[in-house]
Image (cartoon, helix red, strand yellow):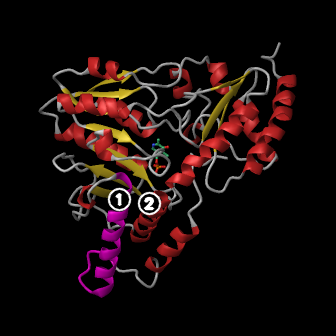
Amino acid sequence: MDHSATTPADPLVVEAMLPYFSEKFGNPSSLYTIGRQARRAIEESRQKVADLIGAKKEEIIFTGSGTESDNLAIKGIAYRNRKKGDHIITSSIEHHAVLHSCKYLETQGFKVTYIPVDKDGLVNPKDVEKAITPGTILITIMHANNEIGTVQPLEEIGKIAKEKNIPLHTDSVQTTGKIPVNVDTLGVSLLSMSAHKIYGPKGVGALYLRKGTFVEPQLHGGGHERNLRSSTENVPGIVGFGKACELAKERLPEEAKLADLRDRLIKGILEIKDSYLNGHPVKRLPNNANVRFSYIEGESMILNLDMKGVAASTGSACSSTSLEPSHVLMAIGLKPEEAHGSLRLTIGRGNTQEDVDYVVSVLPEIVNKLRMISPLAR
Ligand SMILES: *Cc1c(COP(=O)(O)O)cnc(C)c1O
């Protein structure tokens, strides 16, 4: 129940990747047969990735992760446009890959506006419009949040960005393959994706870069990926990513149906006394349930659920090693103790109604047990 942290590679993805480790191991830059074979496989994958988001093949740059795509988009636009301006607009609930890239740029002399969100986690497009200055060179707002699942009104922000002629980047790692994503409908110039969140392998991502939008490369070397991301290509990874995108496109209707399981899960959990939903009730990812329970610690809930064979998460996987309350939950106005009492359950292709009912059946007992020993409980 933690598919927003990562997903298992689909067996068809693994099957597609395997030949590229050994038999077809050529370097795509080599001119002989197995090199050309690898090159062809990369270009076929590029087309499949492009097809999932309504882009052109030439607009896809393969990277090493969703994190790298975010870094390349944000630092790449910032350094490329330094002479034009120094101002970036983002939101307060971005993934750390975006937030920390922006924080870093602040140390380099750039200015960043962090747009707040409402109690459901929504960015108001009007706030984005108001934040624009003559020096604004980039707007970066995530498509859907990885913790609370809230889906942003990105089309509206896209219209504003287009009107003001400012490139819009979106971290789409949680939406590609889950809900329809089309770069033209959204009005984005840059979009980040990651393979391992959509039943592909870890360690491969992509950045969509609209024709006519330019970024400064962050890795210099042999000039791979149109000089924008030097590194010998991760051929098996890229092939797996392509296959994952092809499958994601076919299976989009199935993914939408997860919303029924999600609603069953939320409804079941909210039967527990003093429990609340985090995130928007409707504008949310079809697989995300994020709930909070008064008087208890998310960490102890995770360990107790683990003992019952359920994998879940508190804030995001990235914050599992820190005791700081999640910046996302704080941004929607929760108190630190409320943030700490939150639980994220994210369902996926492998989950059944039985799984959901099982979680709903074991959770009350765990919550009760933890409340009995909680110093916060009355
Ligand atoms: C997982 C995730 C990332 C990071 O992707 P990696 O490929 O794991 O580096 C970025 N943004 C969001 C919203 C994510 O959920």
With 219 as the anchor, is 97 left or right in this view? right
Instruction: Give coordinates of residue 10: x percent, y percent.
Output: 56, 65
| Relative height, residue 264 to residue 353 (above, below) | above
Residue 51 badge: 1
Up-down relation of residue 184 to residue 27 (above or below): above
Q: Which residues are magenta?
A: 27-53
- Residue 84 percent location from the top left of the image: 13, 31
Residue type indicated by callout 1: Asp
Q: Residue furthest left?
A: 83
Asked whether 151 or 204 is in front, the reply is 151
* Marks 1 & 2, CB-CB < 8 Å contact: yes
Seen at 62% across and 20% down, the residue is 336
Tell me if 296 is positioned left or right of 369 in this view.
Answer: left
Q: How many marks?
A: 2
Residue at x 35% of width, y 59% of height: 51
Please give left or right for residue 87 compared with residue 119 in the image.
left
Q: Which residue is mark 2?
A: 245
Specify whether residue 42 is painted magenta: yes
Q: Is mark 2 within 8 Å of ligand 1?
A: no
Kindly report the secondary structure that dominates the magenta region of the rendered protein.
helix
Which quadrant is the C terminus positioned in?
top right
Position of residue 244 relative to residue 80, above or below, is: below
Secondary element type, mark 1: helix
Q: Amino acid at mark 2?
A: Cys
Q: CA distance from mark 1 to mark 2?
A: 8 Å
